[in-house]
Amino acid sequence: MSDIKPDQLDTLKKINEKYDALHQDAGPFLKGFAMNKPVTYWDYIGLETLLSLQRPRTDFPDEPIFIMYHQVTELLLKLIVHELQQVVDSEKISADFFKIKLERVNRYAGVLTQSFSVMREGMDYDQYNEFRLALAPASGLQSNQFRVVEIMCTDILNLVNARSKGKISDDAGVDKIFEQLYWKDAGVDHRTGKKTQTLQLFEEKYENDLKALSGKMKSKNVLQKFNSLKESDSGHAELKNALREFDHTYNVVWPLAHLKTATHYLSSKGGIKGATGGSDWQKYLHPSYQRRIFFPEVWTKEEIENWGNF
């Protein structure tokens, strides 16, 4: 025992205390630890698995770029959800803690916005317009995490389409409200008025979970957490600015970057092309049509009226 350093003895003591509290013997754990292989970078992040997840449907060289871009996007959305989860789960949240989480979210949202140059300048125009034909009816509309972020951030009535705002109440029931969500409009064939296959498949897989999440978030979404704070709380003004930044980045800047990219590929040559999911993509992507605002309380009436134009 003479070659064991004091700090090592202290660590062993803490390990024993930990396993005593669990009514477990620390001995087998320590023996197992002694036999463990060293942790490697590639094993820790699952590198081989990660790099094997690109499965293009065509032989066009630029299709893997399209796949990897969207996979990176989903990872960034997961980071946002990770931070928002800590906000909504906090029983007694402080403005300072809240602000730290929103600042992290804003960094992730900033990367999302900047990353669209990978799509806009990073793929061959002709290749994209060939391989995209093999992707229907898949669409970014089917990103469940995008919907999760929305529901975690705001009251569900703030997500209904412009036609229904102010005309549908919270007691209308989740099924009726969900049918009026703004993004459902993008999943309806404007020629027939029927739901597209894109939307039907998404609803089959995710809608029950999203409805359940909506119920859980009703009293503790990010907007509700903010409204529970007092303006006199330390850090309240900075938090308000962080909420404004996220709302504007996620609901104005990012959609406009997406629209700019879609315009480059779908309307810069040979007329306007349809989206793979069948949506009226110009209206769906432009924030002045979507009118998606997570935190109306932090904006002036004039700013809301000019949403998407500043």
Image (cartoon, rainbow, N blue to C red):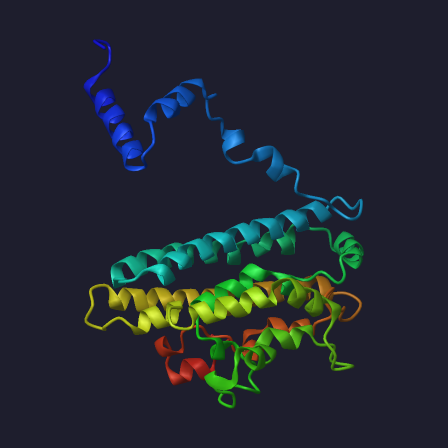
Rendering quarter of residue 298:
bottom left
User: How many numbered discs?
Assistant: 0
Which x, y percent locates residue 208?
58, 67
Q: Can you say whether 45 is above or below 147 in the image?
A: above
Q: Position of 29 compared to 77: left or right?
A: left
Look at the picture and state if 248 lies above or below 98.
below
Q: Pick out the residue farthest to the front.
A: 23
The answer, for residue 248, to whether it is visible in the render is no
For the view shown, which residue lies furthest in the top direction?
Answer: 2
Residue occupying image coordinates x 54% and y 67%: 210
- Which of 135 and 172 lies nearest the eye of the viewer? 172
Residue 265 visible? The answer is yes
Percent across and percent down for residue 182 are 58, 77
Instruction: Please state which of residues 150 and 246 is positioned toward the viewer in this rendering.
Output: 150
Vertical position of residue 301 compared to residue 43: above or below? below
Q: Is residue 212 left or right of residue 92?
A: right
72 vs 127, left or right, is: left
Name the spot of residue 260 as percent of width and height, x first: 62, 65
When the figure is inspected, residue 125 is found, relative to residue 214, above or below; the finding is above
Q: Residue at x 54, y 59 (%)?
A: 145
Q: Quadrant of the N terminus?
A: top left
Q: Which x, y percent locates residue 49?
A: 61, 36
